[in-house]
Image: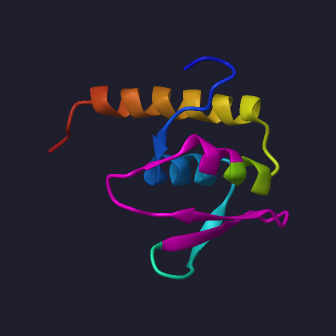
Amino acid sequence: MTKGRLPVLTAREIVKILEKIGFENPRKSKGSHFRYSHPDGRKTTIPIHKGKTISRGLLRKILRDIKLSPEDFFRGVRSFIVTKRRMRRQPVKN
């Protein structure tokens, strides 16, 4: 992932990053779309289609909706990836 180019992520990964930065209460919109809102009033809609990725153009639109710079989003992506890797390494407890 280079600095100027947005990553290609699934809707599920984007939702986890949004939740990590304080977005909550997915309100089901039409069909397979979910509305996420932040306590400060920012809102966005995420299309949830299993196994499909979110295009860079749509990700750019989501970032505009939530007034988040790509740099801040990259920080969220990096910490999400690090957390995901740590979770995979942990042994399963019985």
- The quarter holding residue 69 reads top right
At x 58%, y 46%, the residue is 17
At x 49%, y 37%, the residue is 8
Vertical relation: 44 (above or below) 17: below
Image quadrant holding the C terminus, namely: top left
Residue 45 drawn in magenta: yes
Which residue is at the front of the view, 88 or 13? 13
- Res 66 visible: no
Q: Horizontal and vertical percent for residue 40?
A: 85, 63
Q: Is residue 69 left or right of residue 6?
A: right
Q: Horizontal and vertical percent for residue 28?
A: 54, 79
Q: Is residue 69 left or right of residue 9?
A: right
Vertical relation: 71 (above or below) 47: above
Q: Going by the picture, which residue comes out furthest to the top?
A: 2
Residue extent of the magenta highlight: 33-60
Q: Is residue 75 left or right of residue 79?
A: right
